[in-house]
Amino acid sequence: MTKSELIYKIAAKNPNLTARDIEKIVTVIFDSIIKAMANGERVEFRGFGAFSVRTRSPRTAKNPRTGEKLQVGTRNIPHFKIGKRLYDLLNQ
């Protein structure tokens, strides 16, 4: 599902709101999630899952084209842990 599809579905269920208002709401929600994760915070939606940031330690990598070894520094990566309700729906 894309952001525009999400906006369309919300608009279909809430005819009293304009698509422009819904787009602003969805944008604020996504921006809030991004800012929280950028600050190292965990974002949790009960039943759906939780987003967090994990730190990947430095390592030696290999360039697949040249075979040259490279040093890759510490990286922060997003992590998603699925919630119980979503897990159960996917694995019925």
Image (tube, helix red, strand yellow):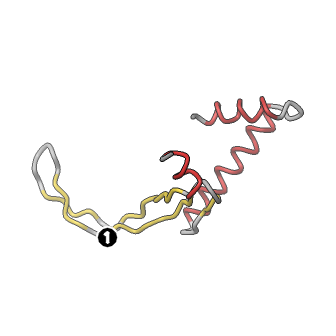
**What residue is shown with label 1?**
57
- The reply, left or right, for residue 92 in relation to residue 13 is left
Residue toward you, 73 or 83? 83
Above or below, comparing residue 48 to residue 36 in the picture: above
Choose between 39 and 14: the one closer to the eye: 14
Residue 45 at what x, y percent from top left? 64, 58
**Horizontally, is 30 left or right of 86 in the view?**
right
- Does 1 appear above or below 32? above
- What crowding class fits label 1: few (fewer than 14 Cα within 10 Å), some (14-19), or many (20 or more)? few
Q: Is residue 71 above or below residue 90?
A: below
Q: Residue furthest front?
A: 92
The number of numbered badges drawn on the structure is 1
Could you tell me which residue is drawn at 21 percent across and 64 percent down? 71
Near-viewer residue (72 or 5): 5
Residue drawn at (61%, 63%) of the image: 36
Quarter holding residue 57:
bottom left
Q: Position of residue 74 (x, y in %)?
A: 34, 68
Pick the quarter of the image with the N terminus. top right
**Element assignment for label 1:** loop
Going by the image, does 53 lie left or right of 85?
left
Name which residue lies at 73% across and 38% down: 23
Residue placed furthest toward the left: 67
Q: Amino acid at mark 1?
A: Ser
The answer to whether residue 22 is left or right of residue 90 is: right
In percent of the image, x 55 and y 63: which residue is there? 38
Expressed as whole percent of the image width and height from the top left, the position of residue 12 reads 77, 29
